Amino acid sequence: MEHYSIYHLVAALIVLIVLSGYFSASETAVMALNRYRLRHLAEGGHAGANRAQHLLQRPDRFIGLILLGNNFVNILLTQIATLVTLQLFGELNLLVATAIITGVIVIFGEVMPKTIAAVNPERIAFPSSLLLLPLLKITHPALLVLNTITGFLLKPFRIDPQRSTLDPLDREELRTVVKEAGALIPQKHRDMLFGILDLEDVTVEDIMVPRADIVAIDLDKPWVDVAEQLKTCRHTRVPCYRTSLEHIVGILHMRNLSRLFRPGAELDVSDVEALLTPPHFVPMRANLYAQLLNFQLAKQRMALVVDEYGDVEGLVTIDDLLEQVVGKFTTVPQFAVSDVYRQSDGVFVVDGTANVRELNRAFGWTLPEHGPKTLNGLILEALEDIPDAGTSLRIADYTIEVVHSNEHAVRSARVFPPAHLAPVPDAAGDGRVGD
């Protein structure tokens, strides 16, 4: 009978060690589940995900169940181990038996199962929820008492044990999620998502066409010159002004000209003015998200950008905004052919008017974006003077050498990117970026 009892006690020890490992693994697996993936699977009808989500609706009850089960199993395991030791080895070996059973519980009841569950949370949590849900219902009265006492003790610390574990993500956290998605999301799609997340951080000033580059029609010029400009214009919408850009008369949609330029028709500036629509103005400090809504509400596709004094500083179109999300509509960056020239040694010769933000996006650079918007402005701000050709300076990790300048601005400069960003030199020689 004594041997029979020993065998049963040893078998009970093994069962209890397995149960201890089960509770430990279940706790780690359920708590390690990705909450957003869990919600996605549950909405798709996954039974295991639905059960796990039900467990996490009240994390205080779930944790109470795990601790109740785990502590009961471990205490019972210790008592049975003591009985086995007393029957086989006597009282003198109780301390040794205690050390052994502690090691067994830690290894097989805690470390191993929790490690496995942390690495494979779904494979452990979904099947184990089949047993946990019935246990949750059976032990509900005991858990209710435990959770009531716990909630009362936590109240002074302003901790709500019933609070949902699914907190909303802010923009930076969402950016990290998209970045960590890796091959699950194509690079092009990731760039588009980053573009959407950046809409509130980028202002109209960052993407506008500068005043000096605006193609506009001066209605004070002779009709011959105006007509020639209309015939050769490559833009769909063109601002029209008198005297200066501060006196914008309206916006001309080029498709409306088809009814004017007919054989034998005698036209003048007044005919063009009759086709103009009122101009739309936006502040240069507006963020792109606000401006996108602005375009949508005003049903506009182009706007003139003004500063705090009301002076026209540039022009922005809805295409410019959309390119911040989907990328350039052309195969190479807008500035690639005319503004950036890569030498065979990996050094870039950059036009002074090149947009700093566009350079960073195209080549992975980290030039400062919160100040001047062009390379010329960046150099002038750093030196607080207009430098002569040959002047070198350091901005962030980039060495910049002025190649050509005049009395007003830096026309071009060489940019030496950091070693880890420098491209492989062109074996064929110099060439325009994007060619």
Image (cartoon, rainbow, N blue to C red):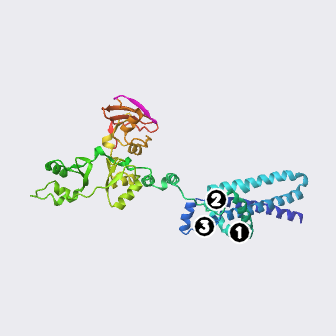
Q: Position of residue 314 (x, y in %)?
A: 32, 48
- Please state which amino acid type lies under the numbered disc 3: Gly
Q: Are marks 2 and 1 in contact (CB under 8 Å)?
A: no
Q: Hey, what amino acid is under mark 2? A: Met
Badge 2 or badge 1: first in the primary sequence: 2
Q: Residue at the front extreme?
A: 309
Mark 3 or mark 2, earlier in chain: 2
Q: Secondary structure at mark 2?
A: helix
- The picture places residue 57, in percent across and down from the top left corner, at 62, 65
Left or right of residue 396: residue 159: right
In this figure, which residue is indicated by the disc labeled 3? 48
> Does residue 139 sit above or below 29 in this rendering?
below
Q: Nearer the viewer, residue 115 or 285?
A: 285
Could you tell me which quadrant the N terminus lies in? bottom right
Q: Do residues under tags 3 and 2 come within 8 Å of each other at their CB atoms?
A: no
Question: Could you classify mark 2 by the number of other residues whose Cα lies within 10 Å: few (under 14), some (14-19), or many (20 or more)?
Answer: many
Query: Which kind of residue does numbered mark 1 sit on?
Result: Leu
Q: Please state which of residues 48 and 240 is positioned toward the viewer in this rendering.
A: 240
Q: Say whether disc 3 or disc 1 marks the residue closer to the N-terminus.
A: 3
**Seen from this angle, which residue lies furthest left?**
264
**Residue indicated by mark 2:** 31
Residue occupied by mark 1: 135
